[in-house]
Image: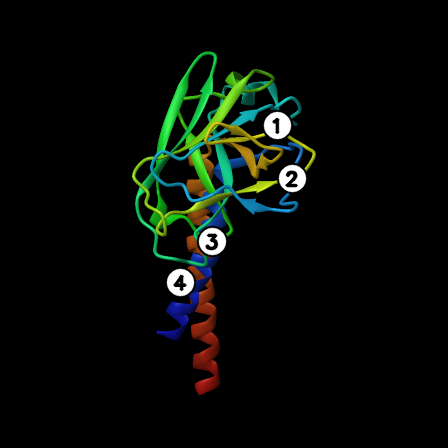
Amino acid sequence: MASALAGLAFFLQYQKEIYEYRYMPLELTAIDWVGGRPAGEIVQDFRLSQPLNIQDADILERDLSEPFCVKLLMANYANRRNRGTFAVSVSTAEARQVKTVQAAEVLDNQYEKVCFEELRFHQVFRKPATLEIAGIDGVSGRSVTAWLSNTPIGERVQVNGAPTDLTLVHTVVLLKDTEKYQYNAYLLLLFASVLVGLILTAVRNREAI
């Protein structure tokens, strides 16, 4: 039993890393958490608008047609029980996609990944685009927030229509089609987990002799 649990623990430890293979980070200029401050609770009618200005990225031409995700550094006020929803959208000259996020699922001081499967990276690369966060039904005292930075790098964010000298802490990753590679990796991990369990069982049996 203990050997089986050890094998399961081994599998669980690495399965998340395999899942993350499909998200390819881009070598973008980092928006550091410098002098970080919260944007304010994302309650109903809250609006945040962040221009995306992606000029330099270490990317192959074939990857320009991949969808992408935006990672937002957020906070839930020390693991408070929040509720409600908010929208995260990306608008370009060609298209717009809106995703809904549950406030209860946002972790404290962690990046929230929001993927835009209907958009392609070439639509925002070296082209004007806007990232927006909009409250839907959040209430004060039970809503989350996003972190802003006073780093000199990056476009300035508007909060509820008012300009600021701050930038939303965020980054962009590509959403790669790596399902077949993930499948093979999961099989290899499963084999390794079983092997770990068998080795531990053999060791325990030998010690019992």
Comparing marks 2 and 4, which lies closer to the viewer? 2
Classed neighbour count for the residue bearing mark 2: other residues with Cα under 10 Å, few (<14), some (14–19), many (≥20): many
What residue occupies the far top of the structure in this picture?
Answer: 94
Comparing marks 4 and 1, which lies closer to the viewer? 1
Residue 60's spot in the image, x, y percent? 61, 22
Q: Amino acid at mark 4?
A: Leu
Which residue in the structure is indicated by mark 1?
A: 155
- Tag 4 and tag 3, C-beta contact below 8 Å: no
Which structural element holds mark 4?
Answer: helix
Residue 99's spot in the image, x, y percent? 36, 31
- Tag 2 and tag 3, C-beta contact below 8 Å: no
Q: Amino acid at mark 1?
A: Glu
Which residue in the structure is indicated by mark 2?
A: 150
Which residue is depicted at the point 46% across and 61% down? 10
Left or right: where 182 falls relative to 82: right
- Tag 3 and tag 1, C-beta contact below 8 Å: no
How far separated are the C-alphas under marks 2 and 4?
44 Å
Q: Earlier in the sequence, mark 2 or mark 3?
A: 3
- In the picture, the quarter occupied by the N terminus is bottom left
Q: Amino acid at mark 3?
A: Asp
How far separated are the C-alphas under marks 3 and 1?
25 Å
Q: Earlier in the sequence, mark 1 or mark 2?
A: 2
Q: Nearer the viewer, residue 93 or 34?
A: 34
Comparing marks 3 and 1, which lies closer to the viewer? 1
How far separated are the C-alphas under marks 2 and 3?
20 Å
Q: Amino acid at mark 2?
A: Asn
Left or right: where 114 falls relative to 64: left
How far separated are the C-alphas under marks 4 and 1?
45 Å
- Tag 4 and tag 1, C-beta contact below 8 Å: no
- In the picture, the quarter occupied by the C terminus is bottom left
